Image (cartoon, rainbow, N blue to C red):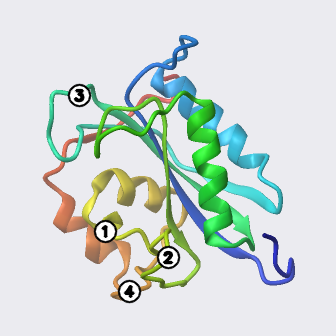
Amino acid sequence: MLQSASSRTDILIAVGANLPRESGETAAETCLWAVEQLARIEGLSVVAVSDWYESAPVPPSGQPPYVNGMVRLSGQVDPAWLLDRLHGIEAAAGRRRTVANAARPLDLDIIAMGDLVRTAPDPILPHPRATQRAFVLLPLRDVMPDWRDPVSGQALDALLPAVAGQEITRRAAAD
């Protein structure tokens, strides 16, 4: 679980939702709730929360648009331990894992844990599709503009042009 508190790492968690919860909360409300839940994870602290964005589903489908954001945490935890905690938060929000890319009331993904690169076991880090998604890169820029992909070494400014055509807009602050 927890390792040395003296060597804290930046941990990036993508937050997304495109369905209301069974209890009635909207996707946007669920995303805010998820930030509160992330702040309660033992050994981690919230450093920054991005603006919220609305994006079309990737890959394209008939689903409603997603609300997306990024949370920058600080701490030192085992990746598998953290993934288990994230799955617990998703389940508490009503997520049921059915088919890949299904609509969901909450999706939490570990995008990166410092400069850690791992291909197995889960979670794979950095997230294997993070650099291909505007809904990851734009919120990531809000919380850590100097981030570099640990695999390629590329900075965000070099990665963003490749996702320029994806449908995404910044949500109004009151949303």
- Relative side of 43 to 26, left or right: right
Q: Of all residues shown, which one is farthest toward the top?
A: 24
Q: Is residue 120 left or right of residue 90?
A: left
Helix, strand or loop status at disc 3: loop
Question: Which amino acid lies under the numbered mark 2 shown in the image of this protein?
Answer: Pro
Identify the mark nearer the N-term, 3 or 1: 3
- In three-dimensional space, the C-alpha distance between marks 3 and 4, rounded to whole angstroms, equals 31 Å
What distance separates the C-alpha of mark 3 from that of mark 1?
A: 22 Å
Q: What element carries label 2?
A: loop
Residue linked to disc 4: 151
Residue in the image at 51% along x and 20% along y: 21
Q: In this view, does 60 lie above or below 111?
A: above
Disc 4 versus disc 1: distance between alpha carbons? 10 Å
The residue mark sitting in front, 2 or 3, is 2
Residue annotated with mark 2 = 121
Whether residues under marks 2 and 3 lie with C-beta atoms below 8 angstroms apart, the answer is: no
Q: Give the residue furthest to the right.
A: 5
Label 2 or label 1, whichever comes before in sequence order = 2
Q: Are marks 4 and 2 in contact (CB under 8 Å)?
A: no
Describe the element under mark 1 as helix, strand or loop.
helix
Please give the residue where the numbered disc 1 appears in the rendered image. 131
* Sequence-earlier tag: 4 or 1: 1
Q: Position of residue 93 (x, y in %)?
A: 58, 29
Question: Mark 2 and mark 1: span between their CA atoms?
Answer: 20 Å
Q: Establish if 100 lies above or below 174.
A: below
Residue at 34% x, 70% y is 128
Picture coordinates of residue 81 (x, y %)?
A: 68, 64
Give the label on residue 63, or none. 3
The amino acid pointed to by label 1 is: Thr
- Looking at the picture, which amino acid does disc 3 mark? Gln
Measured Cα–Cα span from mark 4 to mark 2: 17 Å
